Amino acid sequence: MRGLVDLDLGFTPATNVLPVRWLALRVGESAEVPAAWLDETEWRPKVLRQRYERTADREYRYEVPDAGYATALTVSTAGMVRRYPGLWAVEE
């Protein structure tokens, strides 16, 4: 899968940390970031089109356009995902 920089493991928000940090988007900016993704039904890697939009200082809209999926990620000042609805939430 040439040209892909990121890897998406659907069971953990840890893989969202990498693009959040290296993209360094400003509020209102967005970027498409294709990633290598392991399709669990076929057990083979595929290209996963992803889009990140920074909507606030510590919030991003994360989308997978081909799947019609979107959610809001809340991150720490270091870019670590603190809340990924339905998947992950840091307990205080």
Image: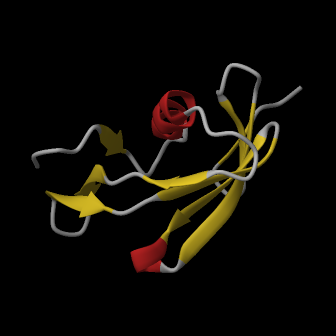
Left or right position of 57 against 34: right
Please name the residue shown 46% across and 74% down the image. Answer: 65
Considering only vertical position in the picture, is 25 above or below 62?
A: above
Is 47 left, or right, of 33 in this rendering?
A: left
Question: Viewed as shown, does residue 36 lie left or right of 70?
Answer: left
- Please tell me which residue lies in front, 54 or 81: 54
Residue 64 in the figure: left or right of residue 60: left
Q: x%, y% of residue 54?
A: 70, 48
In this view, 70 is above or below 91? below
Tell me the residue at 68%/19% (across/down). Answer: 78
Q: Position of residue 71 (x, y in %)?
A: 67, 63
Residue 52 drawn above or below residue 22:
below
Q: Can you say whether 26 is above or below 11 in the image?
A: above
Question: Foreground: 13 or 77?
Answer: 77
Residue 44's spot in the image, x, y percent?
Answer: 13, 58
Residue found 28% across the figure and 53% down from its top: 37
Q: Nearer the viewer, residue 8 or 2?
A: 2
What is the quadrant of residue 74 in the picture?
Answer: top right
For this orientation, the residue located farthest to the right is 92
Q: Residue at x 17, y 44 (%)?
A: 3
- Number of dots carrying numbers: 0
The quarter in which the C terminus is drawn is top right
Q: Quadrant of residue 89?
A: top right
Q: How is the image coloured?
A: secondary structure
